[in-house]
């Protein structure tokens, strides 16, 4: 089972693909959208998994970055179990070799800034 399959299983199990405005589910969607993006999925693919438009995914990712940056306690409480998921790590060299655009280079820089490597 791949990491993305594990994440999809969480989404289905928790009903995160179904419209629901409960804060816990919203925060978990934010975190999972960011997680899927870091796994290399396109916004449209993440949107299909979460049953949302790509523009919502952009909002989710920026919201995740905001809540993480200010270290919101409630956000951390609702997503702590997701944070503890063991990451699938490519080596930095593998990631560098996959970079083909400036955008991908910036994403790699963000991963480095977030201590993924």
Image (spheres, rainbow, N blue to C red):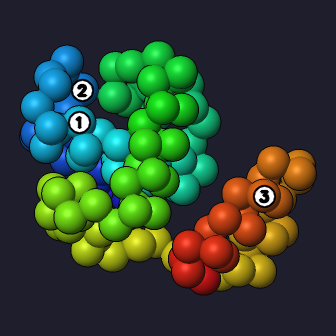
Q: What's the residue at 45%, 52% (across, down)?
A: 66
Query: Mark 2 and 3 residues: CB-CB less than 8 Å, in contact?
Result: no
Query: Looking at the rendered structure, which numbered label has been put on residue 26?
Result: 1
Residue carrying label 2: 17
- The mark nearer the N terminus, 2 or 1, is 2
In the image, is 33 to the left or to the right of 72?
right
Picture quarter containing residue 60? Answer: top left
- The mark nearer the N terminus, 1 or 3, is 1
CA separation in Å, label 2 and label 1? 10 Å
Residue carrying label 3: 106
Residue 8 seen: no
Q: Position of residue 91 (x, y in %)?
A: 65, 81
**Tag 2's secondary structure?**
loop
Query: Mark 1 and 3 residues: CB-CB less than 8 Å, in contact?
Result: no
Q: Position of residue 33 (x, y in %)?
A: 41, 42
Between residue 71 and residue 90, name the one nearer to us.
71
């Amino acid at each position: 089972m791949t990491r993305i399959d594990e994440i999809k299983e969480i989404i289905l199990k928790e009903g995160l693909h179904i419209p629901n405005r409960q804060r816990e589910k919203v925060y978990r969607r934010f975190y999972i959208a960011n997680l899927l993006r870091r796994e290399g999925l396109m916004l449209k693919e993440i949107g299909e998994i979460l049953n949302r438009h790509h523009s919502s995914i952009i909002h989710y990712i920026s919201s995740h970055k905001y809540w993480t940056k200010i270290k919101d306690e409630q956000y951390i409480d609702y997503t702590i179990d997701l944070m503890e998921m063991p990451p699938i790590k490519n080596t930095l060299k593998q990631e560098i070799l996959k970079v083909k655009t400036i955008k991908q280079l910036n994403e790699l820089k963000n991963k480095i800034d977030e201590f993924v490597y």
